[in-house]
Image (cartoon, rainbow, N blue to C red):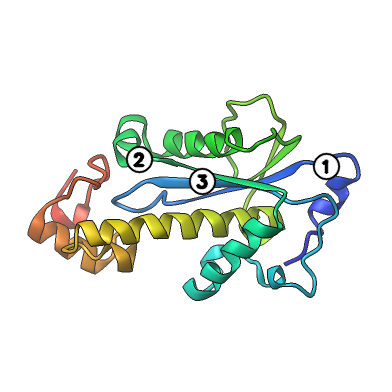
């Protein structure tokens, strides 16, 4: 992926920020958002970031290699997470919006434009934004943010896997796999499970 989407924007705007999240669908753990700003006129061609794409399309090994390269090349980057308790309190959409806004607020300098993956965004900062459906497969800055968000959340879930070894979080990262649902059926929910996420497979409503 290249920065073709950003180039016309850079004609008039220097600080363009890509935003994406990881963890909307899991049954456990936080939702994590990342914000990434690349230098104006940045080009990944012939470098390690030429392999950047939607994080879901990349192997775990490649994501882990690309994440530090993104952080090194970026002008600035930040992550923010909203924990399971707040997801239950707010709902997952509101929690995701909060994580996205908090990631932007954590940048050393507010961007001039936000490029947000998806079709909905609720800004909490006075920064113009553009939503892009499937932006993580179209826009370099968003794809880079998706990699940072995904690898950051995966790292957190591996830690939870060590704390709660019965559930296999280091393998499924909290998503509703058959293994995960069997563990919940056998052991019940652990402290990091989202109580508001119901499982039809277990007769929950």
Give the secondary structure at mark 1: loop
Disc 1 marks which residue?
A: 14
Please give the name of the residue rendered at 55% of the width and 74% of the height, measured from the top-left corner: 62
Disc 3 marks which residue?
A: 33
Give the secondary structure at mark 3: strand
Instruction: Measure how far apart labels 2 and 1 are at the Cα level.
Output: 33 Å
Q: Earlier in the sequence, mark 3 or mark 1?
A: 1
Q: Crowdedness of circle 2 by 10 Å Cα count: few (<14), some, many (20+)? A: some
Q: Earlier in the sequence, mark 2 or mark 3?
A: 3
Q: Can you give x and y, in whole percent of width and height, for residue 125 in the image?
A: 62, 26
The answer to whether residue 175 shows anywhere in this view is: no
Q: Can you give x and y, in whole percent of width and height, for residue 29 in the image?
A: 32, 49
Q: In the rendering, which numbered label is found on residue 104?
A: none
Q: Quadrant of the N terminus?
A: bottom right
Labelled pair 3, 1 in contact (Cβ < 8 Å): no
Q: Can you give x and y, in whole percent of width and height, for residue 4 in the image?
A: 82, 59
Q: Can you give x and y, in whole percent of width and height, for residue 30 in the image?
A: 37, 46
Please give the name of the residue rendered at 15% of the width and 57% of the height, measured from the top-left corner: 184
Instruction: Measure how far apart labels 3 and 1 are at the Cα level.
Output: 22 Å
Instruction: Measure how far apart labels 2 and 3 are at the Cα level.
Output: 12 Å
Please give the name of the residue rendered at 59% of the width and 62% of the height, measured from the top-left corner: 68
Please indicate whether residue 58 sits to the left or right of residue 162 in the image. Answer: right
The answer to whether residue 82 shows anywhere in this view is: yes
Disc 2 marks which residue?
A: 83
Please give the name of the residue rendered at 86% of the width and 46% of the height, measured from the top-left corner: 10
């Amino acid at each position: 992926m290249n920065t073709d989407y950003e180039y016309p924007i850079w004609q008039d705007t220097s600080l363009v920020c890509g935003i994406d999240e990881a963890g909307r669908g899991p049954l456990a753990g936080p939702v994590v958002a990342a914000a990434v700003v690349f230098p104006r006129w940045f080009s990944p061609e012939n470098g390690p970031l030429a392999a950047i794409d939607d994080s879901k399309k990349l192997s775990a090994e490649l994501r882990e290699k690309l994440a530090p390269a993104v952080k090194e090349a970026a002008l600035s980057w930040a992550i923010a997470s909203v924990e399971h308790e707040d997801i239950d309190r707010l709902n997952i959409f509101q929690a995701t919006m909060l994580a996205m806004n908090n990631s932007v607020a954590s940048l050393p300098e507010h961007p001039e434009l936000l490029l947000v993956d998806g079709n909905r965004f609720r800004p909490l900062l006075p920064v113009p934004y553009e939503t892009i459906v499937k932006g993580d497969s179209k826009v370099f800055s968003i794809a880079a943010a998706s990699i940072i968000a995904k690898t950051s959340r995966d790292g957190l879930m591996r830690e939870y896997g060590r704390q709660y070894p019965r559930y296999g979080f280091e393998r499924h990262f909290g998503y509703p796999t058959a293994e995960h649902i069997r563990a919940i059926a056998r052991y019940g929910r652990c402290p990091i499970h989202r109580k508001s996420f119901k499982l039809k497979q277990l007769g929950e409503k």
